[in-house]
Image (cartoon, rainbow, N blue to C red):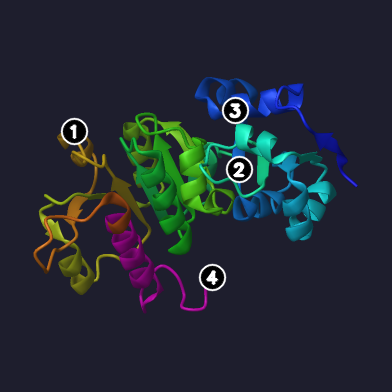
Amino acid sequence: MPGPELISPRSPRVSAARRLARRNFRGKERLFLAEGPQAVREAGMRADVLVELFVTVEAAERYADIVGRAREVGARVHLAAEQVIADISTTVTPQGLVGVCRFLDTPFEEVLAARPKLVAVLAHVRDPGNAGTVLRCADAAGAEAVVLTDASVDLYNPKAVRASVGSLFHLPVAVGVPVERAVAGLRESGVRVLAADGAGDRDLDDELDKGTMGGPTAWVFGNEAWGLPEETRALTDAVVRVPIHGQAESLNLATAAAVCLYASARAQRAPGGCRSVTEG
């Protein structure tokens, strides 16, 4: 059985976990919080990631498989009062489980060495919810990596972790990469780099019709409010817009990212694309 119930929110273990809601403490300890059953379950699937688990009695019974897996990977499991979970959690309605996880970002050189065929680059993305959602979209579309530039939000912000819905634990993510280095490195690795921008001079539908989307591709996504700066667009091979066929003014960042990534995924799996139709 797990250790004794942690009654006091002033417990040193609870205090240490609570501090991880702040970026400077996360960076110092190289630890972050994963909340809820989905995130904790996925964290437990990665070796040496889940360090500690705080769980209420009710949640421990409901998610016995998650608690069991946490113990299997060597995480310290603490039964905690609901007030303790509420103090650690950054959500309004905690689900009874909060995990403490090790940082798991991947060096950019390793991303390039893996010769990825589909990559999402987040340049100047400041909203953590958008960053996590784009990461989730990239995972769903079969991307091999995500790159966050040094001008983007902290990958381990609790909102970003929640918005990724576990996808943070599925694919390599490089962080703090200058956008110039990201674009240059990907191009040198044989990846075509496309900027997604509503003011792009190329239309996504036209690019698909011309058959130019089947090769290794990286999409660069910009700031939620003002898109990509001209100097960033100039670094890429082409600036592509998602066509608006109706009367909507524009698409939000995550929706546009999903459209672009899935367009590439489909083109790459079509005859002549860089993936076979049987490849996962």
**Residue depth check, mark 2 versus mark 1: number of the one nearer the observer:** 2
| Labels 3 and 2: the sequence-earlier one | 3
> For numbered disc 1, what is the local secondary structure?
helix
**Residue depth check, mark 2 versus mark 4: number of the one nearer the observer:** 2
Q: Which residue is mark 3?
A: 20
Where are the magenta residues, as a range? Answer: 256-280
| Labels 3 and 4: the sequence-earlier one | 3
| Labels 2 and 4: the sequence-earlier one | 2
Amino acid type of the residue tagged 1 in the rendering: Glu
Which x, y percent locates residue 113?
A: 52, 46
Label 2 near label 3: C-beta < 8 Å? no
Q: Which residue is mark 2?
A: 34
Q: CA distance from mark 2 to mark 1?
A: 36 Å
Label 4 near label 2: C-beta < 8 Å? no
Q: CA distance from mark 2 to mark 4?
A: 27 Å
Q: Which residue is mark 1?
A: 231
Residue 103 seen by the camera? no
Vertical comparison of 242 with 193: above or below: below
> For numbered disc 3, what is the local secondary structure?
helix
Q: Which residue is mark 4?
A: 280
Q: Residue at x 61, y 55 (%)?
A: 38
Which x, y percent locates residue 140?
A: 46, 63
10 Å neighbourhood of mark 4: few (<14), some, or many (≥20)?
A: few
Label 1 near label 2: C-beta < 8 Å? no
Amino acid type of the residue tagged 4 in the rendering: Gly
10 Å neighbourhood of mark 1: few (<14), some, or many (≥20)?
A: few
**Foreground of the two, 240 or 31:** 31
Q: CA distance from mark 3 to mark 2?
A: 10 Å
